[in-house]
Image (cartoon, helix red, strand yellow):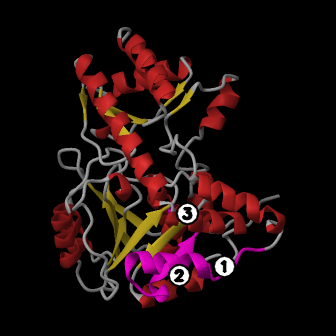
Amino acid sequence: MSIPFTPLVASLPAAVPFVGPETIQRQTGEIFRARLGANESAFGMSPKAKAAVQAELEWASWYGDPENYDLRKALAEKHGVEMENIMVGEGVDAILGYTVRMIAGPGAPVVTSLGAYPTFNYHVAGYGAELITVPYRDDHEDPDALLSKVRETGAPLMYIANPDNPMGTWHDAGRIQALIDGVPDGCLLVLDEAYIDFAPDGSSPPVDVGNPKVIVMRTFSKAHGMAGMRVGYAIGHADLITGLGKVRNHFAMNRLSQVAALASLHDTEFLAWVVSEVETGRQETYALAERLGLQALPSATNFVAIDLGSSERATAMLQGLAAKGVFIRMPGVAPLNRCIRVSIGRPDERAIFAEAFEEVLRTL
């Protein structure tokens, strides 16, 4: 008996963008000693967020507020915009999907960088649009090439992450603003700033909600340590936010995530501590790579890419570290896949990584 899949679904691969560490642990029967591959925060949630979750547990059986009113109000105040310019959703991944659905119909060209965040590509494929890529330049996403390809193809949608995943590199606010200014009529730029809390000052241009050609994505998954709680948000022109409201899952946000995000948003002291701890870990990782004769790419994120020289060596390092109980990842396409990508862990996790990394490196 055949299943009446749509032609689009029937054509898609049976795959997801990432293989989770839990899957690898089930396959090997071993538990990772250091989980440094998913860019989750090793430093957990704000104590205030934890307290808010505990206080709300009694009402966890209720639906969350479908308007996300309190959180949207606080986010609007933080960014100096109106509530109509904020959409809250179940992580940036979901909002990316809603954005693709809203803008790019079947067959529409969508422009991104070759090797950039694969979940965006997953949604483009899932809605039947055509993914068009341009190469990185010097391990950075290339705004000029992205714009050129949009003009060439007439693409209605373009994606860039700043800072970038998987390389950790970034552009300053002026370069990103020039990209925004160059977006042609009939195109929407998705500016993914998931890692912006870790970036140097001057990396993000002012949010202009009067410009319908750009929508900015932010998350509580990284610096706020709430990846498992699934809270992201978009900032944009009121008409864009209204459009997302037409296709979003209105009850996707649970009450615990809503109160935790609101509490974390106001815990600026905790956020500053996490950013400081990540910077310490980045410097340790740079020093480790230099001591071993390798190059670590300067990063504006909570991970560091280390250049192993070839995809074969990077793959061997990933496998060797997994055998020693250390979970990391590596970029998926050349030339980025000459690197491995390691999230910044707690001091004990960083020590485990450093020891295992040096041991595996001697075998390559």
Name the spot of residue 312 as percent of width and height, x first: 35, 24
- Left or right of 182, for residue 58: right
Residue at image mark 2: 73
Q: Amino acid at mark 3?
A: Gly
Residue range (magenta): 63-92
The disc at residue 265 is none
Query: Residue 241 at x, y = what percent?
Result: 48, 84
Crowd around label 1: few <14 · some 14–19 · many ≥20 (10 Å): some
Residue carrying label 3: 91
Element at label 2: helix
Q: Nearer the viewer, mark 2 or mark 1?
A: 2
Question: Which residue has dot 1 on it?
Answer: 250
Q: Is residue 338 something one can see in this rendering?
A: no
Image position of 220 with respect to 153: above or below: above
Horizontal side, residue 353 vs residue 253: left or right: left
Q: Tell me how far mark 2 sits from mark 3, CA to CA.
A: 18 Å
* Magenta run includes residue 81: yes
